[in-house]
Structure formats: C-alpha cells, structure tokens
Image (cartoon, grey):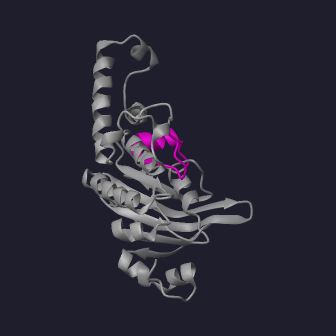
Amino acid sequence: MSLLQVRDVTRRFGGLVAVDDVSFDVHEGQIKAIIGPNGAGKTTLFNVVTAFDRPDGGTVTFDGVDLTGSRPHRIVSSGIARTFQNTQLFDEMTARENVMAGAHAVTKAGFLATALRLPWTVREEREVAKEAGRLIRLVGLDEWEDVPAADMPHGLRRLLEIARALASRPRMLLLDEPAAGLNTAETTALGEALYRIRDEGATIVIVEHDMGLVMEVSDEIVVLDQGRKIAEGPPRLIQKDPSVIAAYLGEEDVDEL
C-alpha cells in the first residue's frame, strides 16, 4: 500500500482552478518529484497536502489515515514535515539551535518543566542536541554547527532548513524548491544529502524547477500543467512524453528537461 494517497484533489481561487482533479501515490522509500511550468499548481498542491490550504474536493490519506482538512500541527504529528520556498530560520540562533528547535513537536518537556531544569528535561535536551548534531552531519553542515544562521550562505541555509525539518522525525519529507538559488556545487551537495536522507528511511516528495536535480534523484515524477496532472512515471519516460515536451518547450527537443 502507498504511504501517501492523493485522490481527485481540486483547489479553486475564485474562478481560477489552481489544482484540478489531481491524483497520485507515493510509496515508502521513494523520492518523488512534482514538476511543471510556473503557475502549474505545484506549491498549492503541497499546501493542500500539508494542510496549509483546504481542498475544494478530493482527499489526502497518509499511512491509511484521512488527513483531508486537518490542521498543520496534526500533519506534523502524523509524520509529515515540509520546507518552504523561502527559508524560515531563526537567524540569531546557531545551526545546531535551529535544528533543536525543530524537535519541539516530538519532545515531552513543556515550558515549566524546562524552566525548572528537572533532571529528565536535562537528559532530553542532551539527547535533542546530540540528534541535532547527527542531522547537521547528515546534510553536510559539520563545519557550520555553531555558526549563527544569519552568517550562513544561502545554499547552506536551505540544507539547514532540511535538517530542522528532519528533527521532527518525519516518515515523509516534502521539499518546496530546495535548489532555488543554489549554485552547481550546492545543488550537488543537496542531491547527495537527499540520497542519505532516503537511505535513513525517509520518503521524500520534492517540488523543483532544477530538472538536472529532478532527473538525477527521482524514482518517479508527477508533471502538472495548468493545475492538471499530464504525466506520471520514471524520469526516462517523462523526458520523452509528448505532453510534457509540449508543456515545457512547445514541440522542441526536451534534452534540457
């Protein structure tokens, strides 16, 4: 059975149909990409899946549980984490502190217990700090652990946001344009990090414009155009699909796709 099932999801904004009757599955252990031209409905679909937006029709099911219309905190507690197009870090905190902050959804200590420094909260904090260090190494930020987020280059900030999302121990990680603004070396580092994250057991869904990265890391790809799904399958088939070629490049060759 698939881990994530999206069935007939539709989202309208007035007379605009941003997502139009879209269905697909994501199986455990996959890296699945959602691509499409600008305005295709990719981020809106992400927002529906993660409950930042409500669908006008259709359902979202995760691990057999219907999450349609849930609130974002329930999505996180169910085992789904996401990043956003614009990084949302605590600039004054170090990389390690940012990742530790991402663990709040799975820690037990409340404000009062933490303030009182009860022995079990101290132990929990040490465990969270240790796990934060491991996640920072996982995404390749070893040398930046004690550096404030504000002092980190753009590409590394994106990797840090992924590490922070992983701190909630998700079974599925949704990444919205993680390669936006990255140079070639940073994009390569991102791809390597995605493989390591997948190999540790997380399922990944990625919305991305960098077709080189998408074709390299994806097991399957969903293609949207004007809100509708026009193709789905492994990268090699997607590259040759006539409807995908038309959506991106008219009738031209699609070697750069």
Count up the numbered dots.
0
* Quadrant where the image shows the N terminus: bottom left
Above or below, comparing residue 230 to residue 75 in the picture: below
Name the side, left or right, on which 122 lies relative to 238: left
- Residues 42 and 63: in front is 42
Q: Residue furthest left?
A: 199
Q: Is residue 74 magenta?
A: yes
Q: In the image, residue 35 lies at what x, y percent?
A: 49, 68
Instruction: Identify the image quadrant of residue 247.
Output: bottom right
Q: Residue at x 42, y 48 (%)?
A: 156
Q: Is residue 3 visible?
A: no
Q: In the image, residue 22 lies at what x, y percent?
A: 53, 67
Q: In the image, residue 190 lies at what x, y percent?
A: 37, 56
Above or below, comparing residue 221 to residue 247 in the picture: above
Magenta segment range? 69-89
Q: Residue at x 40, y 51 (%)?
A: 173
Q: Residue furthest right?
A: 15
Instruction: Identify the image quadrant of residue 100.
Output: top left
Q: Is residue 193 magenta?
A: no
Instruction: Identify the image quadrant of residue 30.
Output: bottom left
Name the side, left or right, on which 27 lies relative to 89: left
Q: Residue at x 40, y 57 (%)?
A: 186
Name the side, left or right, on which 229 lies relative to 255: right
- Residues 28 and 169: in front is 169
